[in-house]
Image (cartoon, helix red, strand yellow):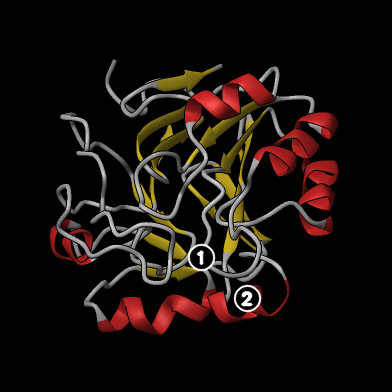
Amino acid sequence: MKPGSTSGVHLLRNATVFLTVGETTFLVDPLFAPPEQLPPIEDTPNDRRNPLVPLPDMELSYDAVVVTHRHVDHFDERAKEELDSKVPLFCQPEDETEFVHDGFTDVRPVSDNISFRGVTIYRTPGQHGHGDLAKQMGPVSGFVFEADRTIYLAGDTVWYDAVERTISQFTPDMIALNGGEARFNYGEPITMGIDDIAAVRDIATGTLVVVHMEAINHCLLTREQLRKSVDDITVPEDGESVTF
């Protein structure tokens, strides 16, 4: 299957996915570095170099790029070098200046919502951890993509009231969560773990997909652990698609 040919989510690796709604495909959070090219995330439980696994060998075919935030596991130097500088690039307003500085000429910050090729894109809140640590992690965003179907891409967030409100407001047909329960040697996890994902499953009516697994050294929750702990979710392997 050519990526983007059917509505849904096609996982490449970590949070890098093709997300397709209607006839439009978005490349989300491109991390293109080969295995072990990047250092381990500092002050985390192990010192494995990143990414831990390679990208699947597949065609990169898409209409636009979406970056939820600029942490290196969501947008790296290799992506900056390889992406077409003229590609439409959607981001949170806080990141616009840096993308322009990188040489991208069609940067489209999403303050509230924006339309592109029959898709309405809504920016949604995220909280990258808890307490002071969440503040240190900086701003992050999720996005809702609405066309013939509605997909909510939550981004790097934990479960909190804004995620619940987003699900209640949009009633998405599919939700893509960043799991992995990423953490440092201090504080609480900064992405969703078992309890967060179970909380989403309890209120969501659509398909629930969990990505951001087993690719970065501080993501400690495994696919096997998650599948055994939360029912009625899909945890794709790298290179797999989840479609309607």
Looking at the image, is mark 1 or mark 2 nearer the viewer?
A: 1
State whether residue 147 is above or below residue 41. above
Residue 30 falls left or right of residue 232: left
Contact flag, marks 1 and 2 (Cβ < 8 Å): yes
Q: Nearer the viewer, residue 221 or 2?
A: 221
**What separation in Å lies between label 1 and label 2 (alpha carbons)?**
10 Å
Q: Position of residue 177 (x, y in %)?
A: 59, 41
State whether residue 213 is above or below residue 89. above
**Quarter of the figure that contains the C terminus:** top right
Among the two numbered marks 1 and 2 on one chain, the one whose residue lies closer to the N terminus: 2
> In which quarter of the view is residue 160 placed?
bottom right
> In which quarter of the view is residue 11 placed?
top left
Disc 2 marks which residue?
133
For label 2, the crowd category at 10 Å Cα-Cα, with few meaning under 14, some 14 to 19 and many 20 or more, is: some
Under circle 1, the secondary element is loop
State whether residue 210 is above or below residue 116. above
Q: Position of residue 44 (x, y in %)?
A: 43, 64
Q: Position of residue 36 (x, y in %)?
A: 17, 53
Q: Residue at x 50, y 24 (%)?
A: 224
The three-letter code of the residue at mark 2 reads Leu
Q: Position of residue 146 (x, y in %)?
A: 63, 40
The three-letter code of the residue at mark 1 reads Phe
For residue 171, say whether it is visible: no
Residue 187 falls left or right of residue 201: left
For label 1, the crowd category at 10 Å Cα-Cα, with few meaning under 14, some 14 to 19 and many 20 or more, is: some
Disc 1 marks which residue?
184
For residue 4, say whether it is visible: yes
Residue 5 falls left or right of residue 243: left
Q: Nearer the viewer, residue 21 or 224?
A: 224
Label annotation for residue 139:
none
State whether residue 236 is above or below residue 147. above
